[in-house]
Image: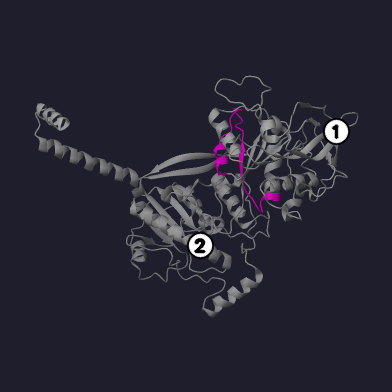
Amino acid sequence: MRCRRKRTRSVLLLGLPLFLVVLSAVTDRQFTTAAEKQAKARLTLHSRSRVETAAGSGLFRTVAKTLNWDPKKTAIVVCDMWDLHHCLNATRRGAEMAPRMNRVLKEARSRGVTIIHAPSRCMEFYKGHPGRKRAMTIPRALNMPQDIGSWCYVIPSEEQGKYPIDQTDGGEDDDLLEHRQWAAKLTALGRNPLKPWKRQTDLLAIEEGDFISDDGHEIWSVLELHNIQNVILAGVHTNMCVLGRPFGLRNMAKNGKNVVLMRDMTDTMYNPQRAPYVSHFTGTDLIVEHIEKWVCPSITSVDLLGGRPFRFKNDSRPHLVIVTAEREYQTDQSLPPFAVSHLGGDFKISHVFANPQDRNDLPGIEILDEADVALISVRRRVLPPQQMVVIRRFVETGKPLVGIRTASHAFSLRSKEPPSGYAAWETFDPDVIGGHYVGHHGHGQQTSLRIADGLENHPILTGVETASFVGNGSLYLSKPLGESAMPLLIGSIPGKPAEPVAWTHIRKDSGRTFYTSLGHIDDFRQPVFRRLLMNGIYWAAGLKPPDLLPRGADVKAVTASKSE
């Protein structure tokens, strides 16, 4: 009671009637609620693009950027989410993805985003639909781009890169027997088995206020009439329709719209039996990377729905993050093609490269938080504390790690104090690698290799024949290994004691490590070394190494010139 009388007396002393104070408080709450609603309605999108680490390097780092878009000036275009497709697997994946996409559209619609349904060649089905009539009656825009009504196969920026997959067979990835049965079923349904679509899938709701069109002129006019500058593309298939349709990514980008791809709400027409002979889902990843490099950024449905990005149920690939920051052995040139050709069938692959302007910076290292396994090829770098925390956190959670060559002294300055504002990890070698690197023998002599006694049947040594296998870099001095390290390969040069050059290590955090001191650019030119490294990555990830090399493993593995 005392407190209440004191507050009342304070109000009276201010000379304001109590009812005005209460009214003011209610009004403040209303204003706050309105402001909160407005803030929630705005679209906060976390975009990802890729830029070259240096002009002409061919190496790309991811760049994250937060976009704050006005929903009233934003549209989502749903591309070709048909009811049926001539590819049975494509039909299945579309049906699997559609429920989450419908939730995306519902949430976006509630915030004021314009929804445009674009099931190409299905307009006859919708001829009496209000959404179709609405699109047809929109006045033609006065600033109509000259080619907005045509398919766009490439834009100038793309000519700087190489298209990553072979889709010349149409991209069907069906089992042949299933495909024949599916074609027969489509025929029995009265559908053309080559073009069976008649409408958009009914798993996506078309609500009042939505538009239906597959015409570039109409869709551009809708955007202009509503002053829409921001466009989100979702749907299928990214490498074909989503990129190339008149309303697709290329035309939106080159004609000045702020356009992004919703990368987890899409699929690709890609057959793993075509180059680069990777899994269907890796094929999609490669197309998304191509888009992020040369066309536009991407986002995920998480920005609207929260949670985790959508992932197809058959996409069980572990996520491998390859961290490269060394200048001696050109692993920034050897590892990317190796990863695609040897690991693209079973792993999702991401790369982190050093900042060429600042050797002690690994932009994008935060992706390690999403990784299932890491490959480290780093030499004597210290990092900003927040980046080192990411690496330590990855290790401390017990996740598997693979190291090659200079990873044994990845974060060491030979016990020197790091510069102010940077952190070292001097004990990374004994803690994580399981070794005791103290230097190396001189350059110039090849290292002879043999399998450690009794380890011939170790899974990492599957298909590893040492008869003609040599180490091309200097032999590292790595003894003594940790108690839980098990040598697999032993290397020697004339007149010097033998040294372990490949081993496994079970860390104190129970995580698996595979390490090899091999990794010279010329080592990658040996199929047997690539086999060893592939096996080590599979083993670390808890997978059985394949008995046969992937079909793409016979491609040229490195492009860099010889250099030490």
User: Is 498 in the magenta?
Assistant: no
The quadrant of the picture occupied by the N terminus is top left
Residue span colored magenta? 341-370
Left or right: 11 in relation to 149 = left
User: Is 345 in the magenta?
Assistant: yes
Q: Residue furthest right?
A: 495
Q: CA distance from mark 2 to mark 1?
A: 55 Å
- Residue topped by disc 2: 96
Q: Callout 1, which amino acid?
A: Ala
Residue positioned 10% across, 31% down in the render: 16
Residue positioned 48% across, 43% down in the render: 47
N-terminal of the pair, mark 2 or mark 1, is: 2
Q: Callout 2, which amino acid?
A: Glu
Above or below 556: residue 425:
above
Examine the image and state in which quarter residue 470 appears.
Answer: top right
Left or right: 221 in relation to 397 = left
Give the structural element (helix, strand or loop) at label 1. Answer: loop
Disc number at residue 498?
1
- The one nearer the camera, 39 or 536, is 536
